[in-house]
């Protein structure tokens, strides 16, 4: 397994009786953890994007269920109270399927262990966390194999250690490829409006001593036109059965630009990101967030007549994707072959 450096700062820290959440809204200026002892508190942290990133919010939700069981078991009505907390966690954000995958795993285990649930759910949540790190390291090596001698890559948003159980998905591929001495140029776009690229990816790679060049989202087309970008590498929040991918807003425009400029597009995501209940991406719910995320530093007058449209994900058709890489395998040209071969 790769011995590449990985971010020493972790998005989530489980204490056994609480979950410490790195508040990613404060990075890169401040490294600050908030501590939660209940499920609704974790749900609020996910909703507020203190913790974000598809795998990371699934892991956080799993610990949220453990905290709920710790709080309510063995009261007579513990199962209904825990079910209510699970519903609150499920309502925190709609697009990343990893959240619902994790909650389904915990729900099933609770149903199978009604007498002594606590040790079983605690073990499962910790396992989901640890397995995600191992999956990312395996995915990183697999993706680096596909990159081969590629020298320059562009990534979007943050699909790094901060968005996962560690090491990262897209950034895991970049970490593994950089360790092999192949990558010469790594570009990260800022990823408006939440700036996951500028505030999180650039910071994360710099912490590992990996050189990274930041650019405005609107500069990506000119970089592809004038630079020698070989691959765009991104994460995912939900992948439909035909290989359509929901990811951070701006991914679709990069995919269209990549097709025009002959740049390859890799999606790196763990198996928990697939939603085979959806035939294609048209059924993926796209989260709309508060318009203030766009307006808050510009239009300060609460009576301003300016509104904002703030979808925070989009869907990239499988036909625009060159490779989908998971810890279990990869598919080249998913638009031709689908992704059923990657099913768990
Ligand atoms: C491996 S992270 C996957 C995915 O999650 C991010 O969204 P957000 O920051 O809003 O949680 C982004 O879409 C990443 O690519």
Image (tube, helix red, strand yellow):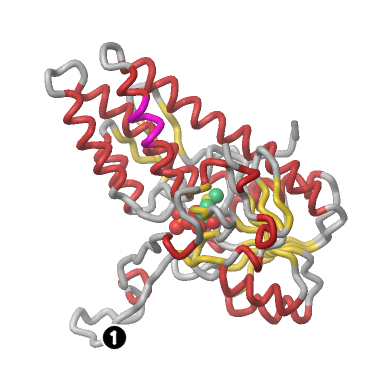
- Which residue appears at 67% of the width and 57% of the height? 334
Quadrant, the N terminus: top right
Q: How many marks?
A: 1
Q: In this orientation, does residue 61 appear?
A: yes
- Of residues 38 and 329, the one drawn nearer to the viewer in this rendering: 329
Residue 259 against residue 80 in the figure, above or below: below
- Which residue appears at 59% of the width and 37% of the height? 8
Q: Is residue 100 rendered to the left or right of residue 270?
A: left
Q: In this orientation, does residue 200 appear?
A: no
Question: Could you tell me what secondary structure mostly forms the magenta stretch?
Answer: helix
Q: What is the x, y in percent for residue 307?
A: 29, 82
Q: Is mark 1 within 8 Å of ligand 1?
A: no
Residue segment shown in magenta? 103-108
- Which residue appears at 70% of the width and 56% of the height? 323
Q: What is the x, y in percent for residue 40?
A: 24, 40
Q: Is residue 82 rendered to the left or right of residue 25?
A: left
Residue 138 against residue 292 in the figure, above or below: above
- Which residue appears at 41% of the width and 47% of the height? 51
Residue 129 against residue 162 in the figure, above or below: above
Q: Quadrant of residue 252?
A: bottom right
Quadrant, the C terminus: top right
Query: How busy is the neighbourhood of tag 1: few (under 14 within 10 Å), some, or many (20 plus)?
Result: few
**SS label for mark 1:** loop
- Magenta-span inclusion, residue 66: no
Q: Is residue 332 rendered to the left or right of residue 238?
A: right
Q: What is the x, y in percent for residue 263?
A: 75, 70
Q: Residue furthest bottom?
A: 305
Q: Residue furthest left?
A: 76
Instruction: Report which residue position mark 1 lands on.
Output: 306
């Amino acid at each position: 397994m790769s011995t590449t450096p990985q971010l020493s700062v972790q998005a989530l820290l489980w204490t056994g009786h609480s979950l410490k959440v790195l508040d990613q809204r404060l990075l890169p200026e401040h490294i600050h953890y908030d501590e939660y002892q209940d499920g609704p508190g974790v749900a609020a942290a996910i909703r507020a994007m203190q913790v974000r990133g598809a795998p990371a919010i699934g892991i956080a939700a799993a610990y949220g269920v453990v905290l709920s069981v710790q709080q309510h078991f063995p009261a007579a009505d513990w199962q209904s109270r825990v079910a209510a907390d699970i519903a609150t966690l499920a309502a925190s954000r709609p697009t990343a399927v990893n959240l619902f995958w994790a909650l389904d795993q915990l729900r099933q285990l609770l149903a199978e262990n009604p007498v002594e649930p606590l040790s079983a759910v605690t073990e499962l949540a910790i396992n989901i966390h640890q397995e995600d790190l191992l999956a990312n390291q395996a995915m990183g090596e697999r993706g680096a194999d596909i990159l081969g001698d590629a020298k320059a890559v562009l990534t979007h948003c943050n699909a790094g250690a901060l968005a996962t159980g560690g090491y990262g998905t897209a950034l895991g591929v970049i970490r593994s490829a950089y360790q092999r001495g192949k990558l010469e140029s790594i570009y990260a776009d800022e990823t408006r409006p939440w700036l996951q690229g500028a505030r999180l990816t650039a910071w994360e790679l710099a912490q590992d001593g990996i050189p990274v060049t930041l650019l405005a989202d609107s500069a990506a087309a000119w970089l592809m036109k004038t630079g020698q970008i070989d691959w765009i590498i991104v994460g995912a929040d939900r992948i439909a059965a035909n290989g359509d991918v929901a990811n951070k807003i701006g991914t679709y425009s990069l995919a269209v630009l990549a097709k025009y400029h002959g740049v390859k597009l890799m999606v790196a995501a763990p198996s928990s990101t697939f939603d085979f209940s959806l035939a294609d991406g048209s059924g993926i719910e796209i989260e709309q967030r508060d318009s203030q995320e766009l307006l808050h530093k510009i239009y300060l007058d609460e009576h301003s007549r300016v509104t904002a449209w703030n979808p925070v994900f989009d869907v990239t058709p499988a036909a625009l994707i060159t490779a989908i890489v998971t810890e279990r395998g990869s598919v080249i040209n998913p638009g031709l072959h689908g992704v059923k071969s990657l099913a768990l």
